[in-house]
């Protein structure tokens, strides 16, 4: 049996689930079974799955939550592709992702063009030591427009409970503290729905009082009321790119070491 491993932080994130689905679809066409492992956002689980899957799979596609990939974790020349996140590593690994820094700058610039000046960023849960490229892009965009950066506007999730609940509580607390925000960039659709719940509870309206952008563009964003403007990260293209890189390694063929997939802004009612 020919098989590859697909490691994801969690399967309740639709972006990760879409990538896993597309990887399975593409690899089946190539004659490979895909074994999917969900780490539940735990570093020890990810390391265990990387070690174990190497013993039964011809290669691994991994959406990593690690801060650093240790040198002895992956066997030398073993086919391995990182997707979305790029931990530090002493050796070169293939990588397929979006330019998250540029995408977040685009989102901030778009909100500023819409008249927003007090923009909150929900970068999502990060492992200790990780720095989000979106935070860097967010800070750069504000600085380029001469807008003061406020630390409390970059929300930090503990990652203990579900995304909606934590985001809702953090934004609700921010609003009750008297912050008059006018824009939110959510790391995921689940974070966006948590933000909308908090705004509604405090008496804010989207988009009249606060404009909202999300980073996932699941089907639910178009069905929401109001429909939510989204940064479409194109998970299908990311998955196809990762499969090309993996098959290149398995078959000892040439492949692109890094592939950056374009992000598109889909405008909907939440920013009009």
Image (tube, grey):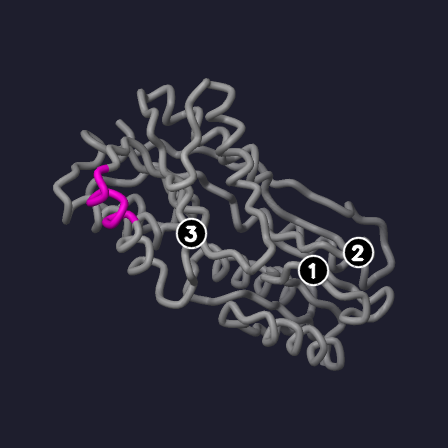
Q: Name the residue under label 3.
A: 156
Query: Where the C terminus falls, by quadrant?
Result: top left
**Circle 3/circle 1 CB separation < 8 Å:** no
Q: Position of residue 184 (x, y in %)?
A: 34, 38
Answer left or right for 134 relative to 81: left
129 or 109: nearer the viewer: 129
Q: Work out whether 106 lies above or below 193.
A: above
Q: Mark 1 points at which residue?
A: 68
Q: Is residue 141 magenta?
A: no
Q: The residue tagged with tag 1: helix, strand or loop?
A: strand
Asked if residue 269 can be seen in this view, the reply is no
Rate crowding at label 1 as few (under 14), some (14 to 19) or many (20 or more) other CA atoms within 10 Å. some
CA–CA distance in space, label 2 to label 1: 24 Å
Query: Where the N terminus falls, by quadrant?
Result: bottom right
For discs 3 and 1, the disc positioned in front in the rendered view: 3
Q: Earlier in the sequence, mark 2 or mark 1?
A: 1
Rate crowding at label 3 as few (under 14), some (14 to 19) or many (20 or more) other CA atoms within 10 Å. some
């Amino acid at each position: 049996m020919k098989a590859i491993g697909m490691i994801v932080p969690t399967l309740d994130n639709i972006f990760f689930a879409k990538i896993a689905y597309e990887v399975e679809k593409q690899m089946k066409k190539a004659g490979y079974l895909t074994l999917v492992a969900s780490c539940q956002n735990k570093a020890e689980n990810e390391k265990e799955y990387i070690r174990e899957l190497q013993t039964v799979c011809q290669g691994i596609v991994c959406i990593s939550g690690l801060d650093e990939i240790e040198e002895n974790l992956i066997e030398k020349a073993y086919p391995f592709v990182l997707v979305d996140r790029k931990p530090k590593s002493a050796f070169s690994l293939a990588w397929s992702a979006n330019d998250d820094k540029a995408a977040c700058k685009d989102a901030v610039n778009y909100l500023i063009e819409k008249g927003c000046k007090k923009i909150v960023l929900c970068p999502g849960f990060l492992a200790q030591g990780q720095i989000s490229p979106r935070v860097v892009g967010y800070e750069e965009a504000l600085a380029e427009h001469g807008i003061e950066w406020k630390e409390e506007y970059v929300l930090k999730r503990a990652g203990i409970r579900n995304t909606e609940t934590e985001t809702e509580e953090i934004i609700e607390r921010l609003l009750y503290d008297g912050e008059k925000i006018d824009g939110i960039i959510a790391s995921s659709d689940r974070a966006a729905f948590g933000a909308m719940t908090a705004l509604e509870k405090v008496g804010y309206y989207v988009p009249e009082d606060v404009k909202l952008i999300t980073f996932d563009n699941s089907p639910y964003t178009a069905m929401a009321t109001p429909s939510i403007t989204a940064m479409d990260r194109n998970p299908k293209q990311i998955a196809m790119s990762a499969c090309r890189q993996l098959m290149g390694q398995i078959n000892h063929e040439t492949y692109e070491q890094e592939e950056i997939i374009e992000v598109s802004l889909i405008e909907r009612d939440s920013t009009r």
